Structure formats: C-alpha cells, structure tokens
Image (tube, grey):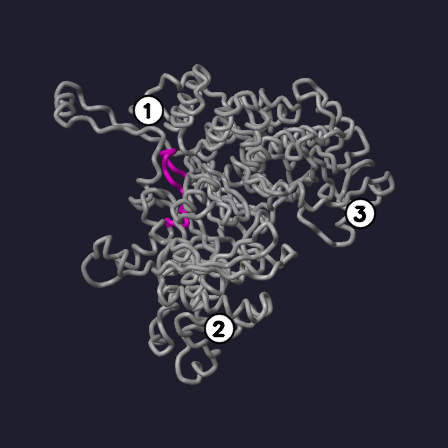
Amino acid sequence: MAMRPLCPFSRKALTCYRYTDFQVNEIAKDGEVVRLRDFVSNAREYRKETKSSPAQSDASKPLTEAAAALASEPAKINATGPKAEAKDEPKEAKLPAGQIAPSDASILVELLGQTAADEMIALYARIVEDPKAKIQGSVKLSTVADRAARTRVHTEVRRIFSGKIDTSTGSDGIIQAAAASRSTQRWGERRQTQQNTRRDGPSGKYLHFSLYKENRDTMDTVGQIARALNMKPNMFGIAGTKDRRAVTVQRVSMRSKDPASLVFINSDRRFNGVKIGDFKFEETDLWLGCHNGNEFAIVMKDCMFSGTEHEPFERQLEIAQSTVDAALAAINRSGFINYFGTQRFGTFEIGTQDIGTKILKEDFEGAIQDLLAYDPVMVNMDTTSSKPGEYVRYDDINRAKALAKFKETGDAQGACKMLPRRCNTEFNILRHLANRPTDFMGALQAVTRSMRNMYLHAYQSLVWNFAASKRWETHGLQVVKGDLVLSTMENGAGKQDDPDEVDEETLHLAGGDADEAGARQNVRILSAEDAASGRYSIYDVVLPTPGYDVIYPNNEIGQFYIEFMGREENGSLNPHDMRRRQKDFSLSGTYRKFMGNFIKPPTASVRSYINDNDQLIPTDLDLIIKSRKTTRDASDGPEIPLEDRRKRVKIATPSDEQIEKPVVEENFQPEDKHEQQDQVMEEVKPQDQDNEAQQEQQAPPPAPVVEENKIAVIFRFQLHTSQYATIALRELQGYST
C-alpha cells in the first residue's frame, strides 16, 4: 500500500522503458559516489610504474588523474634523483640458485631443528642443480602433534622452496618431504613470480576496480570474469549486487593481480556491455554490506498529470515540474514505508516466496517441482528465428525444452546436457536426481546456499511487507506502546540496520553468512511512557523478519504475525518456531526499519522528448566516450584507426565536476558504439530495395507523421543500503505495493 498519492498521474508512466533509464552508482563507505572514470590508461600507468626505474621516469610529462594520484602516494615508485633513491629501503640481493635467504633458514631451524633444516636445504640444492633429474630419497621430519604447527610447516616449506619440495603427513604424525612433481614445481614457480610482481609493484594485497555493466546480472558478470581469468567467483568481493535491467557501477575486489592482465575484458565480445577500470591496490577486500548505499538516476517517460490533458504543452511542462518538486519535498519530509521491492519475489509465475514457503514446511518435493517448473508454451518455440516484437530469451526456451525432457523421460543426465550454462540451480538439482531420484532434500541442498537463502528470505520479506502495511493501517506515523526500537541507538553503538539485507535492487540475492554472523541487535519494547515521551520517532521503529532469534511487537502487530503466517496459503507456519532439523533451513530473523528516507534531498528535472526509445541521460561510459571524441577532434593530424587508438592513445577522462553532476543535454544522443549495444525490444529488418521502389510506384506517398512531444521526469536521489528505489517511486505515484 502507498502512504499517499503525491504525484497525481492521469495514467501510469513508463518507468525504466530502456535499461539506460535506470542507472545505479554505488556509494562507498567514505560517502564518495563510485563512477567509471577510466578503463584503459589507469591499467597502463600501473604497468609503467612497475617496469620503469627511478632514473628512467620523466617528471616533465603530464600525468593522468589516476597516475597523479598514484604518484602522490607515500611509496613513490617514480621518485627521481640520487637523494630520493637513497631513501628507498635496500632490496635483498638475488640469491644464487639452490640457496635460500638467511631469514628463511632461521625459520626452518625453528620449525624442524638444525639437522632436518640442513637436509631440506641440501635436497633443494640437488633439485635446482638438475631440475629434470629424478630425485631419489626423502627427508623425514620429527613428529608434530599440533595441527596448527603442522599446517605452518607445510605452508613455510612450500613458500621457502617455491613449491619444489612437497610435504605430507603419515598416520603416525611424521612429516615426510620429497621433491615435488614437475607440474607442482611449475605451479610454485608461477606463484613465486606473482609474489615477486606484487612485491616489486604497487603495494596492496587486493586489487580493486570499478565494474560498469549494462543489462547484466552482477553475479553472472563476476562469474564470467572469474572464468576468463581461470579463477573462482568466491575469490572476488563486492559490497552488494545491483539491478540487472539497469546501468550500474560498483567496486569489486580480487586478490592482487596485474591490472594490465584484465583490460582485455574491455574489448572482448564475450563481455558486451561490461567495462572495468579505475584500478587501485588496497590492503583489504570488499564484503557484502561494506558501502553506504546507492545513488540512482531514473527516467520516467510519457508522464501526464491529472487536469493537464487540455493545457498547452509548455504549460504541461511547468505544471509537471512544480508538481514533482512539491511531491519530492513532501516525501523527503515524511519518508516512505520501507517495503522490500517486488523484484525480491522473482519474475516468474511461481514466486521465490512460494518456494521458500515449501522449504519451511519441509515440502522438499514440492519445492523441487517448483524449481524445475517451466512455461509449456516455450517448449514448442523455435530458437532459430523470432517474430518482430517478440522478446524471448533463447536461454529460457532451451531451459524449458531441457526440463520438459526430464519431466517426460526422467533422463536427468540428458536434460543436463541441454540446459543453458546460466541455469546452475537446475543443473545442480538434475545432477543430484540422476543418482538419487527421490532424494529431494539432498537435491535442494545441492543448490548453492546463496540461492537457498534467496527463497527463504523472500518468504521473510513477504511477511514483513504485510506486517508493515498492517502497522501503517493501524497506527500510521504514531509511535505506540509495544513498538520495537533498537537499543543500540541509546548508546550510539550503531550497527548496520539490516545485516541480512545487503543486496538492494537485486534480482538474485548474494546470500552469505548473515544468519550466523549477522549483528543481532538488542531491541527494546516501548512502554506507554516511552511512546509518549517524545524521545522516539517513527524512524526509530523497527519490525522483525520472522526468525527464532527475534522478538515481535507487543501489540496487535505482533498478533498479526501469528495470524498471517498461520493462514494455509502462507504455509500454516508459526513465527515462534522457525528452527528446522536442517540448519541451513532455520531462520534467525533480523530487524528492519519501518520507515525509509533519503541520504540527501532528492531532485528531479522535467524535459520534453518524442520517442520512448530516446536515451535521455548519459551513462558514465557515454561521458568517457564523449570526452575522448572531444579530445580527438581538438587534436591535430589525421584520424587514427580504432586498433591503433587502442594501442597508442590514452583515453581522456572527464573531470570530477562533469561526472559528479552530469549535465543532461537537451539533444543528448549516445555514441554509435553505445547505441549498438542498447538493442530495443523490436528489431525492424530492412526490406529489399527493389521491392520497396516498386511499392513506391504503386502506392501514393504516405502522409507525413507528426510526432507529439512527451514529458519525461528524471529523478536523482541517494538511498541507504537495503532500501529500494522502486518503492520510493511507487510511493511518489501513489501505487499500492
């Protein structure tokens, strides 16, 4: 439900008609909005800084913004002159082959004793002297009973000898060392090279970069990057997942790696709509929730306000601007009900909350059937052709065909071969059922934990939304007896409001260990005196998501949880009994603020346009391309071919002022390259020229089409983590949620 209709639209506007109409930029912990400023020269500067010596650096050359920032860091790699060089710490001299550093020798003696350490060093010398020889013999080390101590022995031996000596522990606890296989030795050499590169290059255990994506899912994109780099997706860190049908920018972390080895992603056709850049080395990685929120730029098209249908168009624009300004001022004062967004419940006929309900009811067979459900209409569709105006993802058709085959024949392995690569959940289920056809609980546990959490959290979100509506119907903005508030607000020790909900504007939740490691805030139940004291406002009130580790409001809202969850259509569940025999299916619950508000006052601008396919606001990539084009046009000399530009020209980056407050030009049009990436839903194929000429001779010329001006409203605002932009927009329009 909506609190009040603030913008009286006479018809429903087009929200996010194109994915460029919905733009999301992450807000870092320090409050800075993450923008894509550079996706080529920054990586080249790191390589240049690493390879060049102090004497070779040219201080007279102008630096790009990224390079200047790097040069200003305390560890200046490009310091010039003998004085600067003298200040640098002396580097360790390169050791002769077969020898180890004295500090490493001391570690070996400490761990193994002098005799065993000498034998290990001698074995290493023989291996290095003749790498191709088959080294016989081994070194037996003393028994190490403590597991942590054994782990340290294995780790240090592998590090000190660059993987050329392998260690193993017998059943008696004795550690035995021998020459590693050639493949293991090659792995150790590569790892040593990487460590040397990190040591000689910019400092920092983790490489951070900005990820710009268009019309892509966050986890799918990170997974694809991981596969291209031969890494696992869990080696990457993000602060939160972003909307798929949008243009989004966020920071990503990974284990330290040469940035130049990643820039191929920006020109690889497999990564259409993806750019990475603004590389920086940091000592820590990113984790879910380690950001302050998101900044949104959202376009609503074809807006018409009540009572303006017969007004002149210029007057309609004036009324639209004044109406929207008043609505934003009102919602900024009063806030909005902090509902979970509708995208939390999926986009298919069977909602994610329905699957979560069956899991909590321990109806595992029913949950698996829902997960393997498909649209029968798609089974007979042809993936080799499409009709004009028909928008169907080919992966959805192939998924339906694969699941239909399994349903008809029971051939799980055959269905697995037909599934699109992105259907990881269905693949894991079918692979399990191929060996154990009736083990539905095992099939459900074969699904990744993050996906299982998505279904369970969807049910929690559904209950919370209805409880919030009941709270608004019953008490509105008034604080009443029995309300819950976080007790941390009294001592100032604020933890994150929603440790479990760190994935705003997401279609696929990232999950994590929020239930176990989440900050279980202490809450207090307000007495009548507390509620009347004026010390608490409606922004302090929280409502719980169902769980075994939360308390419920001590008033009619608490009773509503029992009544609502106890309905048959909602699973006949008990909010006070949320533990399950399977730990992964138990829900601890958390608390969520009843009301949401903006980080800073929101703004909106009204403008005219003609075609709904027009792109009205530039993306970060558009700004970079425009700046690049301006720089190229202003330079002297002939046009440089594209391939040569990639090799020889650094991409100019727009200034901070241009990016932080992007100007919406009246006649803004994206560059051709960007326009090709943004396919509209209906593609018109060119007709045969001869046939077209013949038709022109037979038919009279068509009457000129007069296109009418339309009104678009461009909203810009910032929200805290776990708040949904779509909810704020629905509140503005007065639509029920």
Front residue of 723/413: it is: 413
> In which quadrant of the rendered view does residue 405 lie?
top left
Q: CA gap, disc 2 to disc 3?
A: 65 Å
* Residue plotted at (39% across, 18% down): 379
First along the sequence among labels 2 and 1: 2
Percent of width and height locating residue 535: 80, 47
157 vs 578, nearest the viewer: 157
Residue at which label 2 appears:
101
Residue 708: x %, y % from top left: 36, 31
Residue 679 in the image: above or below residue 437: below
Q: Quadrant of the C terminus?
A: top right
In this view, the residue in front, 68 or 733, is 68
Disc 1 designates what residue? 383
Q: Based on the picture, tell me whether residue 552 belongs to the magenta stretch.
A: no
* Quarter in which the N terminus is drawn: top right
Residue at 31%, 43% in the rendered image = 269
Mark with earlier residue (2, 3): 2
Residue type, label 2? Ala
Residue named by callout 3: 535
Range shown magenta: 608-622
